[in-house]
Amino acid sequence: ETGVTQSPTHLIKTRGQQVTLRCSSQSGHNTVSWYQQALGQGPQFIFQYYREEENGRGNFPPRFSGLQFPNYSSELNVNALELDDSALYLCASGQGSTGELFFGEGSRLTVL
Amino acid sequence: QKEVEQNSGPLSVPEGAIASLNCTYSDRVSQSFFWYRQYSGKSPELIMSIYSNGDKEDGRFTAQLNKASQYVSLLIRDSQPSDSATYLCAVKSNQGGKLIFGQGTELSVKP
């Protein structure tokens, strides 16, 4: 167990709705990253936060947004959901220096 | 060319054999490399990190890195059915701290 917790574990939304996913980082870690993993694919980087500032973003549209809070917890928000947003959303935390990231159990989003 | 490439498999080996998983990457200046194990329906679990050329051993796992050839591999000795999973190779990008993943290799260890 990594100490990274995510909620909810599963959720179903309809196209056009909005969703917020939450993550609590492992104690002592100062970076939090979000990844999207479609079925049969490797995780794709969405963005990373360090000290509450976004410091890297992958090839995702602006309707994917996030926040990191002072206690290192984080949120991923997705607006105007599309069918292709159906995936496993993974939160990962790390200390930054080693590059090692430790993943939570993920939130599986289904968009109908 | 994909940034990180792996054979998708499935790779099938008998119990007790050595499983060899391979990964190539495109960014020549990459410095940090990772192997994750992902069981079906679960999240990725970090099993090995490697930063220098050569071999790094941890129990039944050995990671091998050859930066000149831009090649990373993972060997699993004495493979067990519980090793059956998808193995993801990841490379740390030099643009920030993001990890770039391959698509994963599915390993099946047959009793």
Image (spheres, coloured by chain):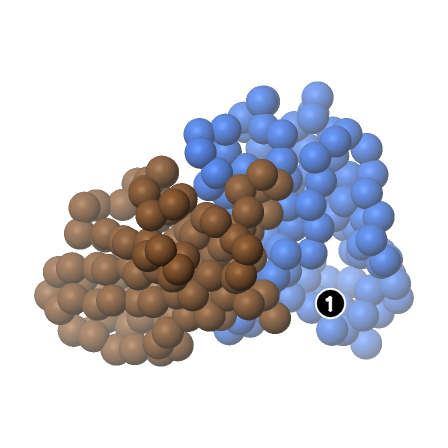
Up the image or down, A88 lies above or below A94; here it is below
Q: Position of residue B56 (x, y in %)?
A: 81, 43
Residue at coordinates 29% horizontally, 59% vertically from top-left?
A76
**Name of the residue lying farthest toward the front:** A70
Q: Is residue B62 visible?
A: yes
The amino acid type found where label 1 is placed reads Asp
Up the image or down, B72 lies above or below B107; here it is above
Parent chain of label 1: B
The reply, left or right, for residue A17 in relation to residue B106 is left
Q: Is residue B91 visible?
A: no
Q: Which residue is mark 1?
A: B83
B6 or A91: nearer the viewer: A91
Q: Secondary structure at mark 1?
A: helix
The reply, left or right, for residue A55 in relation to residue B15 is left
Mark 1, other Cα within 10 Å: few <14 / some 14–19 / many ≥20: some
The reply, left or right, for residue B90 in relation to residue A56 is right
Q: Position of residue A26 (x, y in %)?
A: 52, 62
Residue at coordinates 74% horizontally, 73% vertically from top-left?
B82
Q: Which chain is displayed in blue in the rendered image? A: B
